[in-house]
Image (spheres, rainbow, N blue to C red):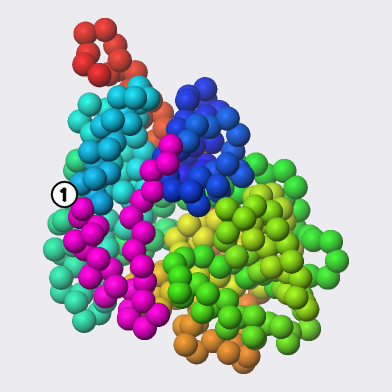
Amino acid sequence: MIPVAARLHGMGHNVIIASGKEHSALFRSELEGLSYIDFAGFKPVYSRFLPQYLSLFFKIPSLLMHIMSEHNRLKKIITDNSIDIVISDNRFGLWNSTITSVYVTHMPRIPFPSLFRFLEPVGIALHRAVISRYKYCWIPDLPGEVNISGRLSHFTNLTSNTRFIGLLSRFSVNTAGYADTNAGTRHNTVILSGPEPQKGMLKKKLVSILRNNTDSTFLFEGKPLEGRQITENGNIHFCSHLPAPEMAQIIKGSKSVITRSGYTTIMELISLGTSALLIPTPGQTEQEYLAGYHSGKGWFTSVSQGTLDETTKLPEIKALWPVDICEKSEKLLNAALKELLVDLHKEHQPGKSR
């Protein structure tokens, strides 16, 4: 959402970020002049042993309560802040009939584990019901054969309000200093993300493997609340968080990049022209699918967390996807924003209800 917020703010609109503290810290570090509301999303607790989909299944009652609660709270936020547009990143309850609402998702098809694949049509139907509540559904991907979400948003019937808006990346907001080199010897880069305890388990495993490597390693811990902090332990530089230009320079100066196969991470790496070794969060079907999909296309390589060890080959960062993927994305986002704002202008014409 950072590039969307930046674009709207740059066009002179008053942008308010409603999120939890961690996401607010990330926005504050990347953008200036925005307003903030504490509005945390649903944050399930994952298991150290159970697959992620089972952990989520047991949390469905809590999720439904949260959806109803955030839907009701949004009404007051809209009134108190005179809001005209709500853009919701995968939050089911943030629609309202009095304003223009946009739902952003890269997976109209929520992938089910192979054992329950036959139930996917039910999931698609339920998700369509959610999407139909919104004025628009934005998919951060490209239409057609060249795409990065695969079957998650392609090969299924999409609702008529769906728009592909291209890849979104915070690294497209401020490109200053994105050199393809880095001071000193080239290094490896690790980008940690996702829920605990799996995030910590992967960190421990990678530190054990990479501390004996002859190359130095920059390890991004994904902790924006801690601000910009860098500590060293042997050949590993631990970065709590860095602003986008600094992070981009380190990534582009890498020999190899190791990361989770989260959708946002993949979009950001593509925007930097950088491939990586993808390690999906165990039991998280979306990440497992994306890792397999992109390694199958030859755009990234992947390995499971369980088989990761000292013998794992770290790939080069050379990009193999079409060179115009970012240019096409820019055009799609411009078209989606234009449509959104033209519709808003029509709604605000005299004689029209808000």
The residue tagged 1 is 129
Q: Amino acid at mark 1?
A: Ala
Seen from this angle, which residue lies furthest bottom?
311
Q: Quadrant of residue 157?
A: bottom left
At horizontal 23% and vertical 70% (from top left) the residue drawn is: 58
**Is 57 a magenta residue?**
yes
Q: Quadrant of residue 323?
A: bottom right
Task: Tell me if 24 is positioned left or right of 336 in this view.
Answer: right
Q: Which residues are magenta?
A: 37-65
Instruction: Look at the picture and state if 254 lies above or below 167.
Output: below
At horizontal 29% and vertical 36% (from top left) the residue drawn is: 74
At horizontal 71% and vertical 83% (from top left) the residue drawn is: 211
Instruction: Look at the picture and state if 113 lies above or below 267.
Output: below
Task: Tell me if 110 is positioned left or right of 244 in this view.
Answer: left
Q: Position of residue 27 (x, y in %)?
A: 54, 44
How crowded pointer 1 is (Cα within 10 Å; few <14, some 14-19, many 20+) is rated as: few
Q: Position of residue 302 (x, y in %)?
A: 50, 78
Seen from this angle, which residue lies furthest right?
184
Query: Camera-side residue: 85 or 256?
Result: 85
Query: Camera-side residue: 305 or 319?
Result: 305
Q: Position of residue 306 (x, y in %)?
A: 47, 87
**Is 13 a magenta residue?**
no
Query: Camera-side residue: 353 or 322?
Result: 353
Instruction: Look at the picture and state if 259 lies above or below 89.
Output: below
Residue 9 seen = yes
Q: Position of residue 236 (x, y in %)?
A: 73, 74
At horizontal 55% and vertical 47% (from top left) the residue drawn is: 25
Q: Secondary structure at mark 1?
A: helix
Residue 252 seen = no
